Structure formats: structure tokens, C-alpha cells
Amino acid sequence: MPAVVSAVGRPAEAAVDIAVVGAGPAGLYSAYYAGFRGLSAVVVDALDEPGGQVAALYPEKLLYDVAGHPALKGRQLIDNLLEQAAPFGTRYLLGRTVVGLARRTGGWTLSTDDGGRVDAGAVVIAAGLGRFVPRRLPCSVPYEGRGVAYHVPRPEAHAERDVVGGGDSAVDWALALAPLARSTTLVHRRGAFRAHEYSVRQLYASAVRVVTDAEVVACHGTQRLERVEIRRGDEVFALPAQALVAALGFTSGLGPVAEWGIDLEHRRIRVDRSMSTNLPGVHAVGDVCAYPGRVPLITVGFGEAGTAVNHTAVTLRPGVRLAPEHSSDAFPGARDRAAVPSSSAA
């Protein structure tokens, strides 16, 4: 993954042309396109790394419907988007949620749950279907960041570990981890999986230990996770585990966005043909937006991002053209410019 500078642990603070809420594909492309149009951008996301649902739910799955790519993994798509935005110094404020939106002279102020603020001339909401908060096992919470994770963005990080995982999306994680981990155990609450039939056949043909009709009931360790307890019927047994992947899914919702006075339609944000909401200078792109005939595809979200940013460029830079120059003419040396994003702190 290209270097991403995040201000996790410090109050969010930035002053930019465009604030992008959401670091999924549509949000990352919005940030790139802002740079392409000569606008500064910051990306804010509640997850601790960029990529949105793609990074959280299927980074190792192949995608076949991204224009220009016959097939690429979700993780590769996110890495490519980060690399594309890197020359423009995109800032990333990760691991925090935007909780407030207030009008100010010349734009908007976004407040974050860590007490920080971002001042922006315009806002692009690209939050997918809303905030994605992992469902947690009560016993796993004390070990978050110390062996417990809710998705697997980097399977190689679990090399030579004893990994226990569970949840509806855990079949794919188990298959990705089996060749790397010292041992891989998949714990499932039911006897059958909802995963694709071919993936389930691969699972049972692999070295993964499959424990069905069971659940993880306890976690133990001193500084980090060391073992877990599993209950199956009346039996409780322990397994060594330096990593527990609780892939139980994510609860979704618009969260604070629903309180910002934005017109909504069936839990999505209503936009016009310029991707504008009813609030001036606030746009919505990707699966969070709604308009007649929209098709929920990644490539559609890319087009919406370009539309929103181009219209924003006209608003923030009076006199510029709505239609940009050809990229091959406008930025002949863009990839040779500063390749490392600037610090997230203003």
C-alpha cells in the first residue's frame, strides 16, 4: 500500500478546498479528482485505514466490474486509488467520525468525534451506505488492537500465528490465511455457511479446522491475546490464538449525517444531476446517494465523484471550465511530483 499519513490519536484539524467524508472507492477517487482540478482535499473515515467496505469486507476477492481492469483484488483497487491521489498531497484523517456539519463564511466546518474540526469550501459525502461499525464479541473487546481484529486487510500480518475466526464472511478470510498462518480455525454458529458453494468446498478441502454449531465465549492473555475458549453444545475447549478475526459483519446507518438537514430518500441522500444535495456546496456520491435510475456499481461511483468535483471546481474557482482538460495534456508530470501525502495536521 502506498504511504498514507493519518493523524489517528490527534484531534482532526485541517483547512482544505474539499472535505471528503468516507474513504471507500468513490471517496478516494473524489480526493484524486480534487487534486486533478487543482483543489486540496482531506478524507475523513471512521475506519482506521482507507478502503471502506472493500478493505473491510473483501480485500482479497477479485473484482470483475471495474472499468479497464479485467480482474483485480479489492486491496489492489484501494492501493491503486491511493497511489493515484498521492501526488496531490491528499490528507487522511482516519479512525474518527464526522459528527457535525455547520455553515461558515465561504464553506463548511466539519466537527469530528475526537474534538477536531475541518474547514472546507465544499463537502463530498461518500460514506457508502453509512457508518460501518463492526459487530463485537463481548469477550473480545479488551483485546482489540492486541490480537483481535474485525477484518483482514493484510493476511501476511498473520503469518506464523494461530488464528481463530468466525462469522458469515469468515470463509474467505480462512482461505486467505490458511497458507500463511501456523494454524487456522474457523468457528461458525450454524452448521451451514452462507458463503458461495465453491468457497465452502475449498474450505473443507483446505487445512482449515472447521468447528460448526459453536461460538467463541472467552479470550485470555496478558499483554496480548494468547488463547480463546470455544463452546460447542455442552463442550468447552481452549485453543491457542494470537489472533482472533471476529468477522461478524458491520452494522450500518447514516448516523450523524441524518441530522444535518440533508434531504433523504429511503436512508440515502437525494442529489441532482450535479450530485448536489439541498445544502449548497455539499455533494453526495457512491452508494449513499439516490437519484432516479441509479445503478450501484463501483464504476458508477467513480463517475459521480468526477461530476461532483468538477461542479465544485466551478463554484470554488469562478471562471474555470466545468469540463476539465484532457489528463494527458493537463498533468504531463503528475506522477513525478511529490509522491508522499502531506501530514494530516494543518
Image (cartoon, rainbow, N blue to C red):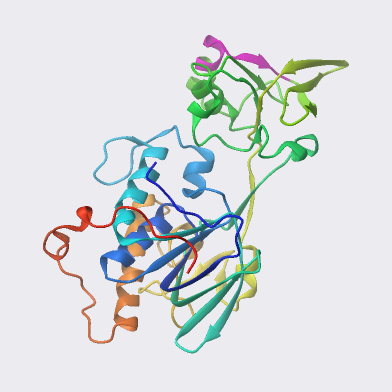
Return the residue nearer the eye: 276 or 197: 276
Instruction: Residue at the far bottom: name it.
Output: 105
Quadrant of res 185: top right
Q: Is residue 279 visible?
A: no
Q: Is residue 68 left or right of residue 115?
A: left
- Does 247 lie within the magenta span? no
Q: Is residue 167 left or right of residue 305?
A: right
The residue under the point 53% across, 39% down is 57
Q: x and y percent of residue 81 in the render?
A: 35, 50
Q: What residue range appears in magenta? A: 202-212
The residue under the point 40% across, 56% down is 28
Quadrant of res 29: bottom left
Return the residue nearer the eye: 106 or 145: 145
Return the residue nearer the eye: 196 or 311: 311
Q: x and y percent of residue 20 in the render?
A: 46, 65
Q: Is residue 298 visible?
A: yes
